[in-house]
Amino acid sequence: MRDAEAAQVDGDFAQLPITGGMIAIAYNLPGFSGPLNLPRDVYTEIFLGNAFRWDDPRIAAANPGLELPHQLIQVVGRHDSSGTTFAFTNHLAAISDDWAAGPGVGKRVDWPGGAMEAKGNEGVAQRIKLTEGSIGYVEAGFAQRLGLSIAWLENQAGGFVLPTIETGRRGLANGSDTPPSDLTRTVPDPQGARSYPIVTYSWALVRAAYDTPDKTAEVHDLVRWILTDGQQHAEALRYVPLPENLVQAALAELDSL
């Protein structure tokens, strides 16, 4: 929550990360053998509408030996308010001054150029699957479940990585084993050679006290289970288990309530 929103909450509370996610850039290029590497300055230019064709020299330079079609790039974005859009645009703004000064960061933004728009991760994923030459952002789990082609993205360290549980956890940890001091932070441009560059958290707002002592104990026990034994179920649900340093920091914050 923003500081102004937090100030309106009665009583003591904590905002605790409980799981993580990744945002994939998926594309539809029939006949392209792939895999497709997208440098960070290039995929920003694509979503700004400044890279128009798939055989753009900047894309070709990152994919030597692969034949890219002379086909228009069709961007697909979200038209509904979305945490996925916030995380994606937060990343783009962190790596591109042009994006920060243009569409900016938000749960909903005005997409440059002639972008197609769809509702929800499901809608974007389906639109990509049906539209040749398209590219869009979608939660990695949706892209994987639908069998969409997923780009290898350049991270801050200059490596090209796919969204996997390993690269996602490294991104969430921001290349550090030290517990973070701020559990409400975002990581818009993770450090680390093997970190996936577009990651996001889901948080729980946990009050220090609820209506009765029993309810307080039950809620706190549930959150404690989510942060410990429950993490083993994240991958099957297409989420990313939290790094251990973050788990320990969240548990300490919960115990301090």
Image (tube, rainbow, N blue to C red):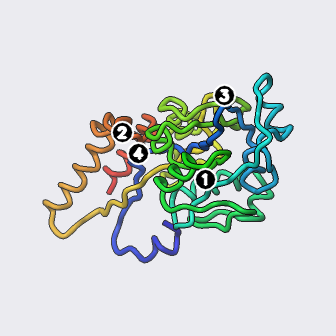
Q: Secondary structure at mark 2?
A: loop
**Cα distance in 3D space between marks 4 and 3:** 31 Å
Q: Secondary structure at mark 3?
A: loop
**Cα distance in 3D space between marks 3 and 2:** 29 Å
**Cα distance in 3D space between marks 1 and 2:** 21 Å
**Cα distance in 3D space between marks 4 and 2:** 7 Å
Marks 3 and 1: which is nearer the front? Answer: 3
- At 49% from the left and 56% from the top, the residue drawn is 123
Marks 4 and 3: which is nearer the front? Answer: 3
What amino acid is at disc 4? Thr
Q: Secondary structure at mark 1?
A: helix
Which one is in front, 139 or 132?
A: 132
Which one is in front, 83 or 52?
A: 52
Q: Earlier in the sequence, mark 4 or mark 1?
A: 4
- C-beta proximity under 8 Å, tags 4 and 1: no
- C-beta proximity under 8 Å, tags 3 and 2: no
* Numbered badge on residue 34: 3
x and y percent of residue 165 in the render?
47, 32
